Image: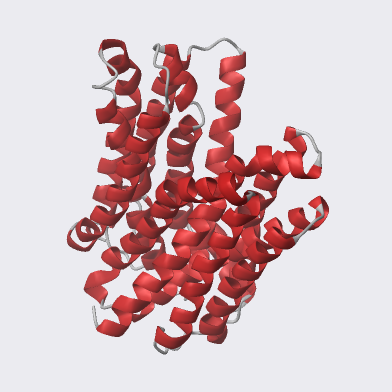
Amino acid sequence: MTRGTHSTTYLVAIGAFALGMASYVTAGLIPMIQADFTVSVSVAAQLVTAFTLAYGLGSPLCVALLPAHRQRSGLFLMLGLFVIANAASALTTSLAALMAWRVLAGMAAGTYLAIGIAAAVGVAPPGARGKTISIIMGGMASGTVLGVPLGLLLAERWGWQAALWLIALIGLVALVGLIFRLPPMPAAQVVPMRRKLSILTDRRVIGLLGISLLAAIASLGMYTFIAPLIDAHGERSVTPYLWVWGVGGVLGSFLIGTLVDRFSGPRLTFAIMLLLGIALIALPLLLTFSPWLALIPIALWGAVGWALQVPQNNELMKARELQGDGNLAVALNESALYLGSALGASLGGLALALQMAVDTLSMVAGLVALSGMGVQAWLWKRPHAHGMACPDS
């Protein structure tokens, strides 16, 4: 990468770090917010729902409506709105206003990530696309694994607002850097809304989104129940397991980039879904023998779960390159992830309510991941729009 494109990638990744924090830190702030506004836990928890729904559902709409020739200014606008929404969240004294600002923050975050990935890839050399996406996704993973505990630590000392101020500050650093360092973006073709909507009938895109959905149901859905799983095997603290999962996720996000640039994306996705399935199925079995052995599948689970989105986003952008709406495909992929996470958590909770053992739940999650291999195999048999075979894409 050239110096300009290199700095662009890392600045977009810094912004991704901030939104990775914003996506998950609110859950840890619920008790403090509940006490401050004198509301129930269930009401305070709707702040998380507001952010995630706006992120997953609002961002594709914003990306679709953003004019092709305004991508650069759109990137600045969305990151600026994200910064303002988090700062305003820290300043507000009304729960209703806080809810509204979390909606705006979620919508801006999802839109920024989609445009940011497209912008960084657009100015990167063709042979560095995978590395570019992996650095950005690694930034988001780092925000979740490292940024969230830091934000909660600040919140415990100076109040829940401190965590949101930190998010706003990190976002502002990224915004100022991008304003000065983002090179002119390649001219984008103007895509009529009718053609943008055709993405919903693109079988390759739908297949790729299906894989992301299944992966999120299995990985993020099961993550909701990692504490009950560990507790069922007599372990007192889940914290070491969460850290191993998170560190695995950061490493997986960063390391997968080189592989994406060297190997076929579909083959990597197939291998990742296989490893994810094996990790989730093996986890309860190894927990039975030794809690230390269980750290191996947990690290693998975190690594491949986070790594998957690098080849997925790369393939989605390639699938819609000629149509000029690769950023919309990335936004839809984020929607699939959030929907899958919610589905996995809901279905898992229902299964446990019906007396399914939590060990069995982990194994079922593994089978869901393995079913993603079947979707990828189906994609291999489907020709590209240009008649090229998928395995060599």
- Where is residue 17 shown, x and y percent of the image? 44, 60
Question: Which quadrant would residue 161 be assigned to in this image?
Answer: bottom right
- Where is residue 34 shown, x and y percent of the image? 74, 39
- Where is residue 129 shown, x and y percent of the image? 29, 69
Seen from the viewer's position, the closer of residues 204 and 110 is: 110
Residue in the image at 57% along x and 65% along y:
168
In the picture shown, does residue 270 fall above or below 168? above
Question: Which quadrant would residue 315 be assigned to in this image?
Answer: bottom left
In the picture shown, does residue 386 fall above or below 152? below
Seen from the viewer's position, the closer of residues 258 and 273 is: 258
Residue in the image at 32% along x and 22% along y:
283
Residue in the image at 25% along x and 49% along y:
268
User: Would you say residue 333 is visible in this rendering?
Assistant: no
Point out the residue furthest to the left here.
Answer: 262
The way the protein has been coloured in the rendering is secondary structure
Which quadrant, please, contains the N terminus?
A: bottom left
Seen from the viewer's position, the closer of residues 309 and 179 is: 179
Which quadrant, please, contains the C terminus?
A: bottom left
Side (left or right) of 96 relative to 157 = right
Point out the residue furthest to the front here.
Answer: 157
Side (left or right) of 81 relative to 246 = right
In the picture shown, does residue 300 fall above or below 103? above
Side (left or right) of 279 relative to 198 = left
Total count of labels: 0
Residue in the image at 56% along x and 72% along y:
79
User: Would you say residue 100 is visible in this rendering?
Assistant: yes
- Where is residue 85 shown, x and y percent of the image? 67, 65
